[in-house]
Image: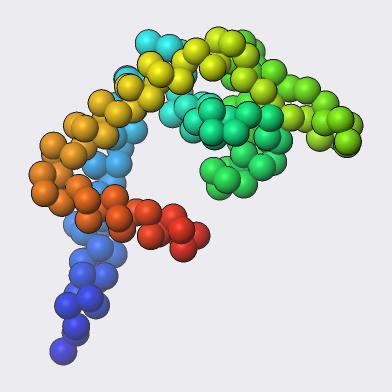
Amino acid sequence: MASDGARSLSNLTSKQGLAAPLRCTQRRGVRAREKLAAWSVTPPQYAVLKVLWDRDGQSGAAIGSRLVIDSATITGVIDRLEEAGLLERRADDGDRRVHRLFLTARGQGLQEPLDAAMDQLNAEVRVELKGQARALWDGLRRLGEAGT
């Protein structure tokens, strides 16, 4: 007889078991795009800005590694943020092959409204999850820390 854990895993791997989480993920992605649209920022761009708000002056490679985004994709995201005037590239003092990314005043100024928009989205998710929000956040955090 299968254990409860094995049955849960089996349910998640069936088409029916994956449909609901996938739909939820898609809806959250749509809501994130809607929340950020007023500032012409996409969810991947927000993620890069968030990393730079935490520590300005990182390389694109470091940001891509932190966000688990391949180099081609992170380069495109950074290009669009630079074109929008939200960040600038500067050559590294010690290694001219490396470019450091620095927020512009406009990029720095978006932290409060964009974080507020994402806080609103997180509040919506908490309401939808009712009492299960903490368990979900804890599980997602553990997955992220495990590198899976």
Above or below 62: residue 45: above
Q: How is the image coloured?
A: rainbow
Residue 70 in sight here: no
Q: Position of residue 47 (x, y in %)?
A: 49, 33
Q: At x 81% / y 35%, what residue is drawn?
A: 98
Give left or right: position of 120 versus 92.
left
User: In front: 3, or 125?
Assistant: 125
Q: Is residue 138 visible?
A: yes
Residue at far bottom of view: 1
Q: Nearer the viewer, residue 71 or 121?
A: 121
As drawn, the residue found furthest toward the left would be: 130
Q: List x then y, in percent, for residue 34.
A: 32, 20
Which residue is depicted at the point 29% across and 50% down?
137
- The answer to which quarter of the image holds residue 28 is top left
Write down the quadrant of residue 99 in the picture. Answer: top right
User: Would you say 127 lies left or right of 30 here?
Assistant: left
Residue 10: image location, x then y, percent: 24, 71
Query: Is residue 105 or residue 79 the one in the foreground?
Result: 105
Q: Residue at image x 21%, y 32%?
A: 123
Q: Nearer the viewer, residue 97 or 6?
A: 97
